[in-house]
Amino acid sequence: MQNDKIYFDIIANVKSKQDLDKLLAEIDFLEKAIYKTDTAALSTSRLYGYIKDIPQSQQDNFLRELRAKLSDLPTTKVKVPFTPSDALMDKIHEAVGGGLIEIQIDSSIVGGIVIEKNGKYIDLSITRQVSRK
Amino acid sequence: MDLPQIFLLGLALAIVALALAAAQLFNLYRKLLANLKITDHVYQKTDKIIDTLSDDIKKQVEKTILEVVQNSTAKIASDLENLIDHDSLRRELREMILEEQKKIQSNLEEYKQSQYEEISKKANTVLSQILRKAVIDLPQDMQEKIVLKALEDAKRQNLL
């Protein structure tokens, strides 16, 4: 039960493909590091902060579960004409209902955003609004 | 000559004169009779001619009337036929003109529509280019605001 909250807290911070890649790299690192007693190396990992209270015998299992949950995350493709700030990423993440956001920088989009979610293509750009009128 | 001789001579002369006058009268009478006969003959001939002429005229008149009636009937029939032909021709022409008019109107509508679409497309392209220029020059925080506004609108419209 407590583990569920930890999973939730970890996954809530995974918003983009980059976040996911970073987390997967950390999982790789931890899977190898947890059996070592190099606490200095472990302390550099943010993820270790979440799992340090879990008994060491269960940590390996926890990380496997986490990897599985991450692979099940729904992905939403988002196209914007610029690299979004973290604040905007949070807003987009919230607007699309969570999951993983795959950002694509597309300079052809004028003023707005294009979202591809569950097979739906939602063009929220100004260009689209103009051509609709 | 003595008086009785002169009287007798005078009497004889008078008798001769009377005889001559009688002869002249007789001749005149004969001539008159002859003239009367001629006149009668002429009358008879004239009557005959008139009768003949009258028949001819009657026949001619009848013939002429018949011809006129026949010609008139033929002309009326021909005119009637022409009239009918003209009517049907007029009807066909009207239909053809209406058909052509419809085609022209339809072509015109298509042309107008295509022109309208073309203009609309061009207007959109120009507007998009202007917008692109305007938006590209905006600072990122302004562009992010536009994205946020688009997301809010999409949420309101249940697009997400």
Image: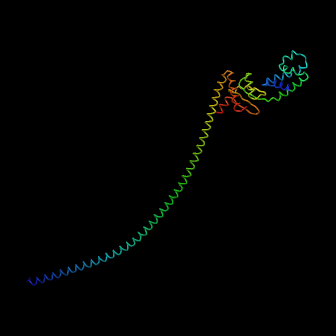
Residue B7 location (% of width, % of height)? 11, 83
Q: Report the front residue among B65 and A111.
A: A111
Residue A42 quadrant = top right
- Say whether residue B87 is left or right of residue A86: left
Q: Quadrant of residue A109?
A: top right
Above or below residue A84? Residue B110 is below
Count the labels in the image. 0
Q: Position of residue A84 (x, y in %)?
A: 73, 23
**What colouring does the structure picture have?**
rainbow
Quarter of the figure that contains the N terminus of chain B: bottom left
Of the 4 image quadrants, the one containing the C terminus of chain B is top right
With A122 as the anchor, is A36 left or right in this view? right
Residue farthest left in this picture? B2
Residue ranking furthest to the front: A1
| Image position of B25 with respect to A121: above or below | below
Q: Residue furthest top?
A: A40
**In-front residue for pair A115/B80:** A115
Left or right side of B97 for A78: right
Where B129 falls versus B8 (above or below)?
above
Spot occupied by residue B146 in the image (x, y as percentages of width and height): 68, 25
Across and down, in percent, residue A86 comes to 74, 22
B137, B32: nearer the viewer: B137
Rendered image quadrant of residue B63: bottom left
